[in-house]
Structure formats: structure tokens, C-alpha cells
């Protein structure tokens, strides 16, 4: 992350942008669909070393960012520089926040090598919650943890204007349910939102009952490193 950050102000000395605002062929071959930008790399036979080309190619979709979205465009460049200075890839090609959280939970080794996770981490830790939510809409609705996501794209505005305990939704449910992530990080003064931040005690696996005798043994863990007590919380209560 530090190497990518250091590269940000070295445009035209360490790397160059290529504007693919009118085409998807030749140098811009990977532009298409929803691609915002891309970089390329190569390696030699019998050599695991990754060699990065120093062009960051910005696709037509990148140029659809408005002046108000400049910071989002800047973080896209950071994403590409993470690729350039490291072996980070794109996981399974799903760039949404929800996919990133689920990948981190189910396959952490792959998640650690996903450039978009580093970009979103940098965004979230350098911006206020509302500003982060607004700047990162290109990557889906906000997610606090698995099972706590925003259902609506305008949840940040709803929570900022009405609070989490408001019951005015089309389904008649409270915003702490349909805007869980925004409630958790933006409106923690409400009692209903405070409850969201308490750990949820559930069984993650259907066979938890068979492990009940191991609940008090911290050395007994599942293959992903979780203890029995963590993964089978409800059973172990």
C-alpha cells in the first residue's frame, strides 16, 4: 500500500497514463463492459518474477466520472498502482464491497491479494463514513459485516436525514434492517443502531451440534482458523 501511495505523485517519472477514451482495441484491448482502467504485466518462463508495464490505461468508463467524482477517479488510479507495484490481482473479478467482505471471510488468502480491497480500505480509512459511502458507490452498497449490508443505494442519505430508528420504508421495516451498514457506522447514537454493533451469536455451520463438547477448548479450530466457540456461538452458549 505504501509503495502504491508513493507512486501516486510520480506520474510521468515512474508511470504514465494512457487515455483510452475512444476505443477498446490495440493498447486499450481490455477496455469494455464496466472496466474503468487496467495495467499489464509479464513474466519469463521458469521465472516467477512479475514485471509490470508502467502504463495505466484509463477506459471510456473512467471518463464518465463527473467533476464531483474526482476523488473516486483518483482511487481507481491507486487501485491500478497497487497492481503495478505488487502481485495483487483481482480475485474472481467481482469488485463489489459485498463480494470483498465475503471473500475475506471464506478465502482470506485470496482476499489479501485483491487490489480492490486495498483501495476500499484506503478510502474507508481516509474519509468520513458518509463521504466514503458517496465516493464508493461504483462498488456497490456499503457493508459493515456479513449479514449487515445496505439494501438501498441511498441509505447514507436516509440515515443522515431521518436516523436509523425511522419506520418509514415501503416494507414497513426499520432502517436498522434495510440500511444496516449505514446505521452501524453513521448513526450509533440511536439505540437500535447500537444493538447492531453487538456481536451476533449464531451457528455458522449446520453440524455445530456435534462439536458442543469442544466449545471450551480454544485449541480446537476449524480449517479457517475459527475456534469452535466462535463459529458455533449459539450452540456453545
Image: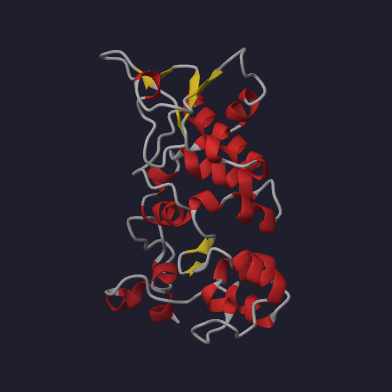
**Quarter of the image containing the C terminus?**
bottom left
Q: How is the image coloured?
A: secondary structure
Question: Which residue in the rendered view is the most extreme toward the front?
Answer: 22
**Picture coordinates of residue 135 (x, y %)?**
62, 49
Comparing 210 with 3, the one in front is: 3
Comparing 12 with 20, the one in front is: 20
User: Image quarter for residue 10?
Assistant: top right
**Picture coordinates of residue 228 (x, y %)?**
39, 68
Seen in the picture, residue 32 relative to 94 is either above or below; the reply is above
Residue at 65% of width from left, 25% of height from top? 6
Question: Which residue in the rendered view is the most extreme toward the right?
Answer: 189
Horizontal side of residue 215 vs 11, given as left or right:
left
Residue at 38% of width from left, 80% of height from top? 235
**Quarter of the image containing the N terminus?**
top right
Residue at 46% of width from left, 65% of height from top? 146
**What number of labels is visible?**
0
Comparing 182 with 91, the one in front is: 182
**Picture coordinates of residue 24 (x, y %)?**
37, 28
Seen in the picture, residue 70 relative to 46 is either above or below; the reply is below
Residue at 62% of width from left, 35% of height from top? 74
User: Image quarter for residue 70?
Assistant: top right
Seen in the picture, residue 37 relative to 163 is either above or below; the reply is above
**Picture coordinates of residue 105 (x, y %)?**
42, 56
Amino acid at each position: 500500500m505504501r509503495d502504491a501511495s508513493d507512486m501516486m505523485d510520480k506520474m510521468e517519472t515512474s508511470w504514465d497514463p494512457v487515455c483510452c477514451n475512444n476505443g477498446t482495441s490495440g493498447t486499450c484491448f481490455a477496455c469494455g463492459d464496466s472496466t474503468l482502467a487496467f495495467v499489464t504485466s509479464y513474466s519469463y518462463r521458469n521465472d516467477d518474477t512479475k514485471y509490470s508495464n508502467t502504463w495505466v490505461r484509463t477506459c471510456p468508463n473512467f471518463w464518465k466520472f463527473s467533476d464531483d467524482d474526482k476523488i473516486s477517479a483518483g482511487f481507481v488510479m491507486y487501485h491500478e498502482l497497487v497492481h503495478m507495484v505488487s502481485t495483487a490481482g483481482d480475485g474472481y473479478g467481482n469488485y463489489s464491497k459485498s463480494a470483498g467482505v465475503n471473500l475475506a471471510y471464506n478465502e482470506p488468502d485470496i482476499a489479501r491479494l485483491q487490489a480492490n480491497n486495498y483501495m476500499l480500505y484506503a478510502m474507508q480509512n481516509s474519509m468520513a463514513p458518509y463521504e466514503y459511502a458517496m465516493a464508493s458507490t461504483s462498488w456497490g452498497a456499503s457493508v459493515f459485516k456479513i449479514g449487515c449490508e445496505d439494501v438501498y443505494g441511498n441509505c447514507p442519505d436516509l440515515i443522515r436525514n431521518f436516523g436509523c430508528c425511522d419506520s418509514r420504508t415501503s416494507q414497513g421495516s426499520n432502517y436498522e434492517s434495510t440500511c444496516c451498514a449505514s446505521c452501524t457506522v453513521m448513526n450509533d447514537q440511536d439505540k437500535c443502531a447500537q444493538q447492531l454493533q453487538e456481536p451476533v451469536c449464531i451457528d455458522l455451520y449446520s453440524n455445530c451440534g456435534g462439536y458442543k463438547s469442544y466449545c471450551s477448548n480454544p485449541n480446537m479450530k476449524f480449517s479457517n482458523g475459527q475456534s469452535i466457540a466462535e463459529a458455533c456461538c449459539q450452540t456453545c452458549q
